[in-house]
Amino acid sequence: MRHVISVLMANEAGALVRVAGLFSQRGFNIETLNVGPTEDATMSRLTLVTSGTEDVIEQINRQLLKLVDVIDVLDMTSDEHLETELALIKVRRDAAATPVATLAEGFDVIQLSEDDGLTLLRFLGSGDDLNRFVALLEDAGMLVELARSGAVTMTPGQGGLRYRAESDGVNAANL
């Protein structure tokens, strides 16, 4: 089963390597990985997509929490969450009879540039929608190059991963 896991961790050199190393050492595959700073510059939020049984995912989450740089872990799969992906897509303009604009109908796609017979597009939406759009482009013989961000997720409302300093100076994650 596909799982989306968010990890709040220290924004320090080597933190990402330790997380990736944990997956590698245990033979777990990371399908997508996205990491960047949060509203607190000392923290990073890592979003990864992996597959496995409930027991495997539970083991992954326990192991992640043991890493020194990891503050909190949230498996967002069963919780209500919003998920999106960004992609830059280069297509041939003259490769198919169907215009890019027609194929892009119903998707959040904008044209960024046209140069040398190629069009650079920006896609924003779910991974499933991106897969469908890419398939349309492939079927039309238009796809030249694809760069994907991987999943970025967040829970609506009050829930989520946030880092705050407690009044006694000890730091804790809020859920």
Image (tube, rainbow, N blue to C red):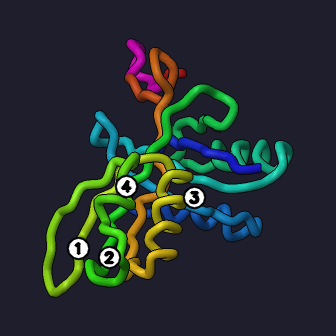
Measured Cα–Cα span from mark 4 to mark 2: 16 Å
Residue closer to the observer: 2 or 40? 2
Residue 108 coordinates in the image, percent (x, y):
34, 48
- Residue 95: quarter of image: bottom left
Above or below for 133 versus 25: above
Measured Cα–Cα span from mark 3 to mark 2: 35 Å
Residue 27 coordinates in the image, percent (x, y):
76, 69
Instruction: Name the residue at 52% across, 38% down.
Output: 71
Q: What element does badge 2 sit on?
A: strand
Residue 78 coordinates in the image, percent (x, y):
69, 31
Q: Is residue 11 visible?
A: no
The type of residue carrying mark 3 is: Val
* Residue labelled with disc 1: 119
* Residue labelled with disc 2: 91
Measured Cα–Cα span from mark 2 to mark 1: 5 Å
The type of residue carrying mark 2 is: Val
Q: Is residue 68 left or right of residue 57?
A: left
Instruction: Name the residue at 64% across, 42% down.
Output: 65
The mark found on residue 86 in the picture is 4
The type of residue carrying mark 1 is: Thr
Mark 3 or mark 1: name the one nearer the start of the chain.
3
Q: Are marks 2 and 1 in contact (CB under 8 Å)?
A: yes
Mark 4 or mark 1: name the one nearer the start of the chain.
4
